[in-house]
Image (spheres, rainbow, N blue to C red):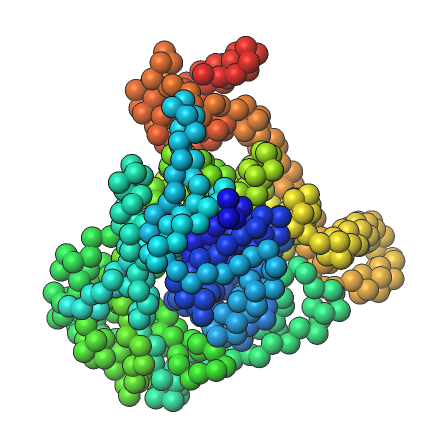
Amino acid sequence: MDYDCIVIGGGHAGIEASLAASRLGMKTLLITQNPDRIGALSCNPAVGGLSKGNLVREVDALGGEIALLIDQSMIQYRILNRSRGSAVQAPRAQADKLAYQNAARRSIEARRSLEVMMDTVTELIIEEKSAAMGERVAGVRTIRGHKIGAAAVILAAGTFMEGKIFIGEYDAPQGRLGEEAALGLGNFLRRRGFVLGRLKTGTPARIAGDTVDYGKMERQEGEKAAPFSFDWTPEGSLLFQPPALPCWITYTTPKTHEIIRNNIHRSPLYGGKIQGIGPRYCPSIEDKVMRFPGRDRHHVFVEPEGLYTNEMYLNGLSSSLPEDVQELFIHSIPGLEEARIVRPAYAVEYDYLDPLDLFPSLESKRLEGFFSAGQTNGSSGYEEAAAQGIMAGINAALKKQGKEPLVLGREEAYIGVLIDDLTTLGTNEPYRMFTSRAEHRLVLRHDTADRRLTPKGRALGLVADERWERFSKKCAALDTIRELLEKREVSPADDNKILRELDRFPPEWVMGISLDNKYAGYIEKEKRIIGRNAKMERVKLDPRTDYGAIRGLSAEAREKLAKVRPRTVGQAARIPGVRQGDVALLMVLARKNAGAGGMS
């Protein structure tokens, strides 16, 4: 083998996968079509948001990179959902796109055991272990004829695998505007029997900021910034002062909607050229206009692309309409009457792997040693990609070490919810994380991510000594804060003294323990539910089980179980179509077979 691990793609999933694998002792090769575009923020110039901010902080707590990257490139910071409960609040930051890319590339190049190669992977090298044990990956072949061996391959191709962009009547084989698609690998996987589909996403136009009339818009300031990463000293967090650029809010008008309706026949989405399914929760402006005819306006957020440019991003105006139509409807929006388009909006259609073909470790059920992460699995968003990337990198390394994979539970992390949803339920549209998807969101607050996951990152070897020492000191301080708050409840006379003692600690630490206390009753109830569910998660199922031979299962359960091949009874219980009676039967059979040496 030339390498222990090859990662295909230099986006947010590829960055985390390659860094995690490298940090865990694997000689790793990152193959990307353009090293200058490692870490590119392809769409919106922001990281975080509702539930997404939680994902960023969880990746950081495990020892990942995305939080450190946004901390180095932040130009505005806000906590979303301030008016609602703490369980659904989350940080979001605007990024300087070029600074983010530069920081990502520096992180990659700083790893001695991680190499970068500019090329395009067109095929996997596959070897047959035996008729009984199936096939395993042995490396990749590239468009320039290179044959590179590896024990593990992680696919993180984003929107580039057989990608095609659309702008009205124009289309081209590209993964991003002006960047060639990665052709060959998608068709290779189809020929090998993998289940692939087509998805669609899009991005708005970028306009010259000096052609905007900001006087006609609402100004949106940021808040006092705080780091996403837990890898800061308390003193450093207090001194954290990135630039603070404003964003702006305007709205579409009836004229905007009229222009779009009059030209909807020129949209490749409505004309039938685009076959892929787009994101339900982030629709194009033409989708909004056609699906919600009663709405007379829609938000448009005008966001800076960075300190290095005056380009502005028109959040809310994703489109695949022709450029002349884009110009017309943009000019119909207050403040944008004279806006000059620098880059047009476009849609992109691409191949994705059916995530039901993946184990919760993100390893393929069809090909041993082959992992997949990010938009290639049917998800959307930088944060979802980064979360899958670090887990794929970790599990590729654990497989090499002969250890069990790391699978986070739904009660442990939003990462666990994300991967469980994809590998248990599948998706036929770009999957987006929401707080509503997490049934245990009360215990998954963004500020508790380090308490939940840093010990796991340390056990893996991703959390360095210095960081672990700071974390240990923080945990001790949190215990002290908890004791002081309890004293305050029973000793009102000593309130001023206790408050002075609490002032020694960072306000966010005090707030975190205060929230723990405030929701203690609800959290205890959640923990009881989690404990009951954990019993089913501990009952293992053999993924090779022949469900068709198990008498008593419903016909639908047989079909669904055979497709998903769950690893635990808990996962089986979450599959739509598997009934309570089916779950009870699986419990009995699993325990019976465990006593006999394994379920078959």
The reply to whether residue 445 is in sight is no
Quadrant the C terminus occupies? top left
Horizontal and vertical percent for residue 187? Answer: 26, 47
User: Who's the residue at 53% across and 24% down the image?
Assistant: 540
Q: Quadrant of residue 397?
A: top right
Choose between 356 and 416: the one closer to the eye. 356
Q: Is residue 48 above or below residue 376?
A: below
Horizontal and vertical percent for residue 108? Answer: 55, 62
User: Who's the residue at 77% across and 51% down the image?
Assistant: 472
Horizontal and vertical percent for residue 130? Answer: 41, 25
233 left or right, relative to 297: right
User: Who's the residue at 69% across and 58% down the image?
Assistant: 511
Q: Is residue 454 above or below residue 237?
A: above
102 left or right, relative to 431: right
Choose between 504 and 566: the one closer to the eye. 566
Q: Is residue 341 above or below residue 103?
A: below
Choose between 109 and 502: the one closer to the eye. 109
Choose between 124 and 194: the one closer to the eye. 124
User: Who's the residue at 53% across and 59% down the image?
Assistant: 115
Horizontal and vertical percent for residue 486? Answer: 79, 49
